[in-house]
Amino acid sequence: MSIRIVTDSTCDIPRDLAGEHGITIVPASVFFGDEHLLDGVDIDSDTFFERLARESRLPTTSQPSPGAFRDVYQQLKDEGATEILSLHVSEKLSGTLASARQGAQQVEGVRIEAVDSGMATLALGMGAIAAAQAVEGGASLDEARDRVLEHYSRTHDFILVDTLEYLRRGGRIGRAQELLGGLMRVKPLLSIQNGEIVPVGRVRTKKKAVAEVVRRTAALGSIEQLAVLYSTTPDEAADLASRLGEVAPGAAVMQGQVGPAIGVHVGPGLLAVVAVLSPDASAA
Amino acid sequence: MTSTDATAPSALDGTELRHALQVAELWLEANREALNAINVYPVPDGDTGTNMLLTLRAANAALPESGAAGAISKALADAALLGARGNSGVILSQMLRGFADGLEGVEALGPAELRTALSTASAVAYGAVPEPVEGTMLTVMREAAAVAADAAAALALDELLAVAVEEAEASVERTPELLPRLQEAGVVDAGGQGVAVVLAGLLYGVRGEALPEPPPAPTGAVDLGGVAHEGHGYCVEYIVQGQGLERAVLATELSEAEGESVLVVGDPSALRVHVHMEDPGVALSRGAAHGGLQSVKVDNMQAQHESWAAGHEDAEDDAAPAPPVGLVAVVQGPGLTAHFRDLGVTRIVSGGATNNPSAGELLEAARRAGRDRVFILPNDSNVLLAAEQAAQQEPDLISVVPARTVAAGLAAALSFVPGESPEALAQALTNAAASARCVEVTRAVRDATADGVSVTAGDAIAILDGRLVARAEDIDAALLAGVSQALESDDMLELATVYLGVDAPARSADRVRELLEDAHEDLEVEVYTGGQPHYPYLVSLE
């Protein structure tokens, strides 16, 4: 029995970490006009955000094709995989999962379980790592899938964007639309809940917004793992991570940068926190 | 008031009690301006007399022609609950509630019943105020009730009431000893005085005595916003600027031109005018003959009245179904109103510091604002109690967010996220309201000392979260002083949002932004047109 873990590039797991855990990442596509770039393969985050600031036309994204998934699954099978757990960005935000399922149908002789994480970025990615660890620990495919779904049930996130404009233009704004300020400049605070982007608050300034994220994170309860993400402001992320370390001592804190595919939809200035609660805390 | 009228009844039946209450209303009306004038703050937020009068008037209007004294007082209390406006009106309504509790099942109000009713009036009023402050109407009622309770058992009803009135008046005189703020300002407590006036009015009614001449309202202390806007025609307000302006001359001219509710205040260089007239053009031309007109405001009172009767709502609003969770904000000024709406407020009730909506109006707005839960943002400390009174009528529907300033209300509205649970929202709105800092800039309407700052009528002043913190030569300097004080007290503040009022000088936006940014380089400044009355500048700091 050989079980492999697959995810997509919206997981924002750094390449080396993915390699360490034997996780295969299928890249989404980013387009600047007709120019087609594979997320994280043809373009890295810093290059992407530089171009985003420079170019007048907004880039767009596209999920990996069914063929891309088919090729990845086929290759893993050829390498000896008998089972594949394929974890993907929320079905309500992207058609990636449907692509994965179609790709899976075209590969025979391997059991492929494609799962909707209901998450995005490192919330998705941390679950993929947990799944890989479960497999490393000898879990079966079903056990690993149950483990990761339980992990996702303990995962919370807060997303702070400088502007809702990128989410709006990319068609991902959802109910966060309610926060679109007309007269006043506001900083919206968002979260992904039940697979959707929902508004959780709004404040006037980034300083207040960060304080609100710290407060809400601390209020979640006992935290096992934390991740702090940024798009263009690593210093702000480092500052946020150290403040979170104070309110959640003992939690492992990861820091990461969102990739181009996520970047298209959140824009510059993003800060996000992913918090995975301790199993006992979320049961309470 | 020590002589006993031979015709005074030994006990009041419902009809006689109703009559006494009507006399009390008349006496309160006669004293209205005098009560309005004795505000502890030298800012135009004192309408104690108006609020108490409108509350008692609403209560009396609901009384049946006759019935048992208990039934009359119950009808009185029920109507007062919804008619209450302003903090003093709400406390008065609670006194009437207690008065009615003490008379439950009573056929006629005799001396024994009066002792009980005064005691319960005091007790219920105390119970309604979360943190009772002495030296206020609570004290006056308590002391009057206590003296009545201890008075000789043989006293007739009117004699007993006279004892209570005498003690109430003595208690009013003692209020400055209990409230330093009153002592600083050199006044007695207006609400306490109002209680004494109501009790005295009842006594006039019981004895069938003619009402004496009311005390004159101190000039220069009249609060324009406290004037009830009744009747038809137009309400015209403006400022005349010039030299050697004569207040009395213009006031007389306006009265001779058949202006009503004429008020002219100010000094020889600037007069502020308020008048009701059938032809607003006449009101304006009389003023223009004396100097240049500024801050002209003309309201059609009939239209105002109609929109008021319609619940201050646009027809468009009424067509929209109420959302599950709604938000009601009490706000004045088109710009501020637009900002509150923009943040998701479902119902606006027009009002503020000097135009306090009644509990009934807030209740009505709340019922239309949301289906499951409605939060009221009072946005003024004088509206808070009326909002709480409205909430008591529908405790499952209405929660009051303790927003005492417009800035607190804006902060709360900002934190309003429709999808959240009502419990989470209640917490979030309350926290947000508490975090906001508000600087209000206006002009003192009288000489006074408050919070350790001495001001002269006409001085520009800055109020930080309800405390007078600075006086200055002009409103720009007061703005800067107030904002600077706020920044000194809280280093988290990084954004000042300035709302320009109707009285703000023309083309203020750039000047105000530069003024604040030059003085505080780390401060971000946004300037919007608020259109609010009384406060040329209103600043929300966060």
Image (tube, rainbow, N blue to C red):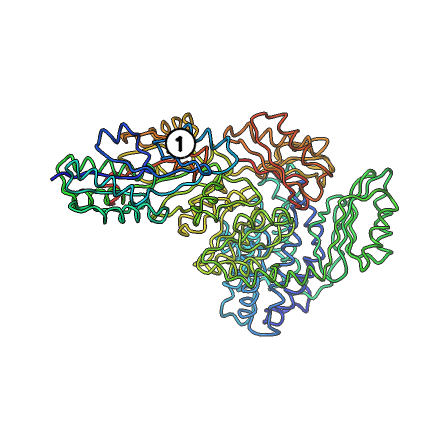
Could you tell whether B387 is left or right of B189 in the image? left
Could you tell whether B34 is left or right of B419 in the image? right
For this rendering, which residue is in front, B350 or A50? A50
How many C-alpha atoms fall within 10 Å of the one at disc 1: few (<14), some, or many (≥20)?
A: many
Residue A261 x %, y %? 38, 37
Q: Residue A132 occupies which quadrant of the picture? A: top left
Residue B459 x %, y %? 72, 35
> Outermost residue toward the left?
A1
Residue B237 in sight from this viewpoint: yes
Residue B152 in sight from this viewpoint: no
For this rendering, which residue is in front, B220 or B376? B376
Up/down of B252 relative to B18, above or below: above
Q: Residue A138 occupies which quadrant of the picture? A: top left
At numbered mark 1, what does the secondary structure look like: helix, strand or loop? strand
Residue B373 x %, y %? 45, 56
Chain letter of disc 1 in the image: A
> Outermost residue toward the right?
B289
Check the picture and name the quadrant holding the C terminus of chain A. top left
Residue A225 x %, y %? 28, 34
- At horizontal 21% and vertical 32% (from top left) the residue drawn is A22
Check the picture and name the quadrant holding the N terminus of chain A. top left
- At horizontal 77% and vertical 52% (from top left) the residue drawn is B236
- At horizontal 82% and vertical 58% (from top left) the residue drawn is B279
> Outermost residue toward the bottom?
B66
**What residue type is disc 1 on?**
Tyr
Q: How many marks?
A: 1
Q: Mark 1 — residue?
A: A230
